[in-house]
Amino acid sequence: MAFALSPPAEATREASTLAVSRARAVRRFKLSLLLPLIAIFALVLTPVLLLQLYFSVHQWTVYLSSWWDADYVGLDLFRDVLTDPRFGWAVVRSLAFATGSTLGCFVFGFLLAYLMYRPFRGQAFFYIIFILPMLTVPVVVAYTAEMMLYRSGPLNDAISHITGFNFQVSWLTNPHLALLTAALLEIWNWTPFSFIIMLAGLAAIPKEPIEAAEILGASKWRIFWEVQVPLLRPVILLALVLRFLEAMAEFPKTWALFQGGPGSATETLPIYIFMTTWQYFEVSKGAAMSYIVMLMMIVIVLVAIQLLRREKRSLDAMYRQRDEEEQAAGG
Amino acid sequence: MAMTKTQRRRLTATARYAILILWGIGAGFPIYWMVITSFKPDNQWFSWPPVYFPHPPTLDNYLNVWFGAQEYANTQYAISSQKPLLSLWNSTVIAFTSTFLAVLFGSILAYGVSRYRILSEARMFQLLMLRMIPPIVVVAPLSLYYSALGLLDTRTGLILVYFLTTLPYAVWMTKSFIDEVPREVEQAAEILGASRWRTLFEVVLPLIRSGLVATFLFILILTWSEYLLALIITKTNVSTLPIELSKYQGSTEGRVYGRQAALAVGITIPLMIVGLIIRKHLARGFSFGMVRR
Amino acid sequence: MSKFDVTRRGFIEGGLGLTVANFVPGSAPFASAATMEEQTIAAAKKVGAAKVNGMIWSPYFVPMQPVIAEFTKETGIGIGGVQDISIFDAPQRAMAEALSRSPQFDFIHIDSNMIPSLASAGFLEPLDEYIKNSGFHYDVVAGYDNFMKYNGHTYGVPTDGNVHIQYTRKDLIDNPDNKKRFADKFGTELKVADTWEENLRLQEFLMDPSKDLYGSGNLRNRANGVTWWYMIFYSAGGFPFDDDMKPTLNTPAGQYAVDIYLQDKKVNHPEAANWGTPQMIPRIAQGHVVSCQYWDGTCKTIKNPKQSKTVGQFYYSVVPGSKFSGKMLRRSISSPLAAILINKYSPRKAQAAYLALWLGSGKNSIPIVSDPVNAFNDAWSNAHFAAPQVINAYTQEGIDAIKKNFEIVCPPIYLTGYLEFQDALGKNLSEAYVGQLAAKDVLKNTENEWNKIVGRIGRAKLKKDLVSYKAAMTKRDVPA
């Protein structure tokens, strides 16, 4: 530092030009690293969102005019959507579907992960079997479900054989059950996801606090609730949030299997938007609906992101502390 | 309470195996059903009572679906203009190219984030929105925009959107690998006079090779099975396997379940293989740096 | 046939066609010298060879291939690529094409009820000019060609009549024991039903769920069920709009139709609410159904022993009617009436149009409609009804029933916005059928939704459309 204060003027200038050019090079390099992202936003996302905005304030009746000639109607379409009971029901169905399937995935995933996080004979085998559903293409899940779930189909038949009752559930045609069936499929399909995350989370918990609690004679139950769950909070949150968001967007299974029916029992938001836009060609109403859903989802995602960030920070802090302690111990 | 410790341990172990086996059956049965249906002759597809094991098993479904072999089909099920092999090719090209692009640009971005903080932590999380907002909300204007650009029903079009929607995963996942590379290695490379790009491509990325492979395969799973975007953006020229599968519904003869299953097995097997190869890395892919090893 | 022969034949026919087309345009004596098919070839040759692309479902397309191959041999016009898409999904895909004004598909094979919507969206090429050039005429029963016309232009070439006929199980009706029990119970003879009420009564009487035998094989799913509703509604004297395009669903005729429609639940399979043709046709052919109204092609499936356990066990007849309006009316329906339509934005539209007209000639389409395996293309032309091949595929009894039903056939809503109107009604009917919606609200809700659709598309425009719709409605009460 002292040296840097007293060099001849020329050298300072040289050093500073070097520093400036270096900084410029770094800046240019950083920009070029960012370029693909900037290109995506400028060339794809912005035009698409602008088009969507255009449609949501212009009534385009596809039979009458080209889209660029559509009439400006202000916020009429948004009012239409918000007063449309069908839209309201779709929101309710989507929330119910997403909440139910998220909880289902989580409970089963966590249970399985808890049973498996410590090594035991056959662990690898079970792990492989358990992740298979996640590796099945969603449309395949839908069509396989159709092969299995009709009234005299293998599922009812197998349950009848096992229980001895004549089990006759109309999984696909009973309007009170259809959404549940869709949720069960989602749970079947995505429990592996929660399982994998929870398993990794459980395996990463430091052993010391658990061992300490065991020495103190705490029951497994208490260790679970008072030591493991608090340490798992970030992972639990992650499993819930991601699953919920993905379930809100679920389309392939519900569409391939139900197309919104029976009646309108499985008309969730993605299905309703799809039908409005691609079956009734109310592109404008679909756009307004999309914007509302997008805003709704952005709010949910932002809240979720805040939660995740907070947890990640505390997690990072915890691990940093541990690393430092280890280093101190090692050194 | 009278149980000895060994007894209790044995009981716990039994209970654990019981639950795991039960769930294993639940998880495996639909897959089993799909596979056996693909080997069933037509009179057992939709029979009552259901047939739990095909007798005699037959390869007709596979030969008919994948090789268009009509002589193996009872003629009424022959659907001649389906082109699963073409779809297989489309799916392969689209999934591999988009995944390659996502991993390439994802790792470049991740490197920038890890070493140059080109995105703040908040921005990194906001990047996830690309993935978390349901695609249905933008798919209509996207298709109009595409039709204006001539990208509708092209592989390029689908590759571009798949690239977009998987980029967040690629960035997060590769970043978790890059974070583990000690900076000293890069500093050494820099001192030896390597340019920044060379450092990235010839030093950093090769070091995380296995991580890149895991990321690649992870994203491949997502692009391979995508349905909604393909449904809307493709028409005649480009049809991916999930779309092809949905065409196997309907004909006068009832659902052609056996054929559908033969196709479904063909779509699913590659995915399962890929998934099993990278099973150890799946958690990292999904967890956005939230799960430590 | 040697290569030389082909060329010579092509040369002669081409020459003949050219002569007719070039030197004596529209001249009646000469026009009769060349057949419709020859004229089509001649006209097609003038527009040059091309490979055309289309959207068509493979069960329809497969039996067309040999007929197309013949045309290709003569004119060089053939098929480049097809998008294989189900007839039920095609309307949406076609509208998406119309919106993007895409020239990708030269022709689309689709429910003809989409003509008003697609023509209004500017997507369809009128065929009048091509029809004149090729001397084409629709050789059909009664005014069936009106299904192809909209606002004074002709837009489509049918490939599939798809009229509904009544199927009733012979073995069950003619069973002496059943006859006696029925007579004892109701005091009338057990026979093929003439009215909806009689039909329900015999279905209920003969069904036996313990043997997996259900009374009805009608569709009641969200996409197709509404087709059945129109038959009942029309036969009760109903029509969905007044002259000012105000919905007239919530009328006695409408309520009657809803009531009959929902009573099907008593006699149909418990899972019918989600079943479409893929599930139902095998049920009918395997003998699990007493009676139903169904598309005529099912005759072919029933007659094919590979697919059917009920060969020769069905009566084919006119669909039931109703005396609700004061006089006996019977109304059959044709939907989806699959037809080939031409894309106005296509650079190969002339080639595609002539190919369509070639496929639409009564003579050429005989092998198409008589294919017993890919049974989706159903007879529609008078030429078919006389052809031994066709009669053999459907049975004489089947053909007689088809002809009779054509005399009283109607379209569902034949207006711009068909899909929207149709889905609003279909959704409400389906909800009522599964018990989500009270029967009394079906028509009220539908009228509200329809009013909004009319507002959006424009009352004045739809009032003009109404003319074409009414022209397609049959003028007869019952078949002659």
Image: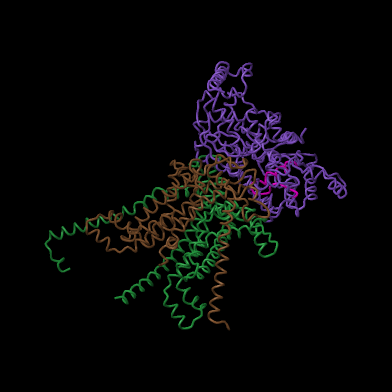
Say if C474 sits above or below C30 in the image: below
| Furthest residue in direction front, as rendered | B56
Find residue B111 and report its horizontal and vertical position in percent: 33, 58
Q: Which chain is brown?
A: B
Q: Within the magenta stretch, is there residue C466?
A: no
Give the tally of numbered discs: 0
- Lateral position of residue B277 relative to residue C383, left or right: left
Residue A328: which quarter of the image?
A: bottom left
The reply to whether residue A83 is visible in this rendering is no
Residue B109: which quarter of the image?
A: bottom left
Q: Which chain is purple?
A: C
Foreground residue among B79 and C321: B79
| Furthest residue in direction left, as rendered | A8
Foreground residue among C77 and B79: B79
Range covered by the magenta-colored residues: C214-236
- Lateral position of residue B32 relative to residue C318, left or right: left
Say if A95 sits above or below C355 in the image: below
Find residue C104 and report its horizontal and vertical position in percent: 50, 37
Q: Within the magenta stretch, is there residue C233?
A: yes
Foreground residue among B222 and A79: B222
The reply to whether residue A202 is visible in this rendering is yes
Foreground residue among B114 and A215: A215
Quadrant, the N terminus of chain C: top right
Colour of chain A as rendered: green
Find residue B107 and report its horizontal and vertical position in percent: 36, 56
Quadrant, the C terminus of chain C: top right
Find residue B171 and report its horizontal and vertical position in percent: 39, 57
